[in-house]
Image (spheres, rainbow, N blue to C red):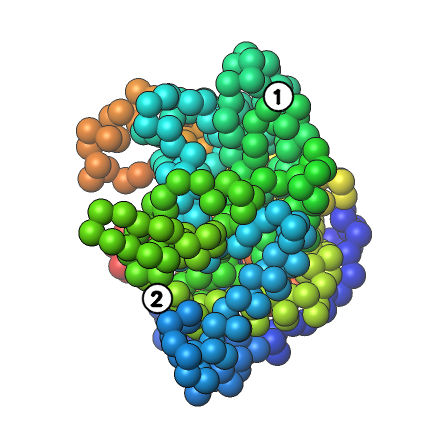
Amino acid sequence: MNFRFFPWTQPTNYGHLFLGLDTRVPLAAGGSVPGINFDNGATTPPFLSVLEEINRFAPLYGSVHRGAGYKSVVSSQIYEQARTEVLKFVGGDSRTDVVIFVKNTTEAINKLANHLWNKNKKEVILTTWMEHHSNLLPWREKFHLDYIEIDEQGRLRMDDLRAKLELYQGAVKLVTVTGASNVTGHRNPIHKIAELSHRYGAKICVDGAQLVPHAPVDMRPSHSIEHIDFLAFSAHKMYAPFGTGVLIGPRAFFEQGAPDYQGGGTARMVTPDRVLWYDAPGKEEAGTPNLMGVVALVAAVRTLSAIGMKKVLQHEEGLLGYAYEQLRWMEGITFYGGIPLNQQQLSQRIGVISFNVEGLFHEDVAEYLAKEGGISVRNGCFCAQPYVQRLLHISRQEMEYHMANPSLPHPGMVRASLALYNTKAEIDSFLDVLGRIVSSRPRIFRSLRTGN
């Protein structure tokens, strides 16, 4: 079909910036093909620049803040300089904000929950029905947690956010939301949420795991009513393996009280009955820091900055529009999050497409894509089960049945998630295999189940 539902140009090929894209994977019928990775929502391949920087720095690797030797001094300088580069990348306020390095987004949000927790008072946290478990479970036992509603397409309802802020009359301590959904790709209007939250005396936390790698992020100055108070994200979703995450927030906030993890590197002075903690961020990074992870993150930040996050967003938006342009005509597929109908709706998404093929179990579809096309996707609930249950219209009674019978096949969907290195040709391959699945559903189901 020549009609272009969305305007797009031939995307730039960024494949030369990555390692492993030409790795061949086996097919069920024999032979192999270069693997196609559409599971970037889970983790991403490394930039070549990241591995090159790790190799360049490795001979200078030393202990951070724990020695006067040359390697230790250099390592400490690089580690501290990294905070400045990371903060600049997301538009943090260098006068007030501090960067704390953690393992991943999950640890970052748990750390924030631990610091906000008042053991003597059950305070109110507002989250949403579209969150990853990492932005749900850390809050449940410590706070009174309430959920902002979503519409039929899984988008956040701003009117319900306002209604709940009004309902609690200034008692909401924090509004914590995903910047972009790992299930539907919907991007939330984080600055509008920030403005509304601040007007009611609440702070805002953004889970940026799915947003920071795919779109420009600007936390804005601390005096702005649209300022993002807390931001969390992970390096492994932005082309930098080695296990580092980031929590950014007000330095003054983290200066209060004791750190949630205590031990080496957190204390300035210790006696048998007293302790004097370091200032933040030092006291929040117990143990030997993951310097290699931080080096990798900064290398990824530099590469993404050199490309330009607007170009990253445009590239992935173009691929997403091209994919939907073809998929919207394919019968037998149910899409979750709705099909974007115009350029404005498309621009409010990141490159995530979640769907089911009618009559087939989500696991079978993912398996067929892998075995027949060498295409890696994700299937299941993507660590966002309440959201997926809402989108699938699964009742609480049905979920209670599954909870009582955990060996039953779990409800879920299939997710293709795009990234900077993906290409139009890869989408064409995906569309070809998916078309074969849709047109041959009974045969495919029997083949997968019987092995014939």
Residue 325 in the image: x percent, y percent? 69, 49
Residue drawn where x is 51% and y is 18% of the image: 171
Observer-nearest residue: 302 or 36? 302
Relative to 369, does residue 230 appear above or below in the rendering? above
The local crowd at label 2, few if under 14, some if 14 to 19, many if 20 or more residues have their Cα within 10 Å, is few
Q: Is residue 432 left or right of residue 410?
A: right
Reading the image, the residue beneath label 1 is: 200
Examine the image and state in which quarter residue 390 appears.
top left
Q: Residue furthest bottom?
A: 59
Residue 320 in the image: x percent, y percent? 65, 52
Residue drawn where x is 30% and y is 20% of the image: 397
Mark number, residue 136: none
C-alpha distance separating marks 2 and 1 = 40 Å
**Amino acid beneath label 2:** Thr
Relative to 121, does residue 321 appear above or below in the rendering? below
Relative to 135, does residue 127 appear above or below in the rendering? above
Reading the image, the residue beneath label 2 is: 288
Residue 4 in the image: x percent, y percent? 78, 51
Residue 113 in the image: x percent, y percent? 40, 37
